[in-house]
Amino acid sequence: MDILLINPDHDNYKDNYPWGVLLVGSYLSSVKYYKVKLLDASVYSRHEFLEKVKHFISKVKLVGIACFSTDTSFVKEIA
């Protein structure tokens, strides 16, 4: 796997479909032919998500994290 793309849990209890991460991942995989893994934090508990990040982090060359200004604490923790 080449790239891990992370969509943060926006913690606003709405259905936040990860359009941005999906768009970037689709481009990277279908146009640039990178192997991409998408990880959506809103699907998992905080503990499960961090375990998944730990699992994939050593298997990728690059990590991308989507972020709204309200997600900064989450992104700082992951980074």
Image (tube, helix red, strand yellow):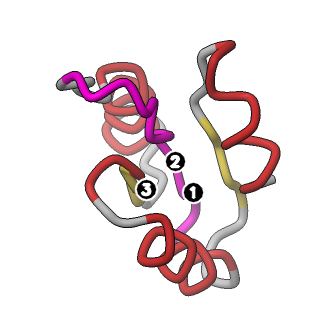
Question: CB under 8 Å between callouts 2 and 1?
Answer: yes
Q: Disc 2 versus disc 1: distance between alpha carbons? A: 6 Å
Tell me which amino acid carries mark 2.
Leu
Residue denoted by label 1 = 3
Residue 7: say if magenta.
yes
Q: Disc 3 versus disc 2: distance between alpha carbons? A: 7 Å
Tell me which amino acid carries mark 1.
Ile
Question: CB under 8 Å between callouts 1 and 3?
Answer: yes
Q: Residues within 10 Å of mark 1 (few under 14, many from 20)?
A: many
Please state which of residues 10 and 29 is positioned toward the viewer in this rendering.
10
Q: Which mark is residue 16?
A: none
Indicate which disc, 1 or 3, sits on the residue closer to the N terminus: 1
> Element under label 2?
strand
Residue denoted by label 3 = 36
Q: Residues within 10 Å of mark 2 (few under 14, many from 20)?
A: some
Tell me which amino acid carries mark 3.
Val
Report whether 56 appears left or right of 24.
right
Q: Position of residue 48 (x, y in %)?
A: 42, 77
Question: CB under 8 Å between callouts 3 and 2?
Answer: yes
Report whether 42 appears left or right of 56.
left
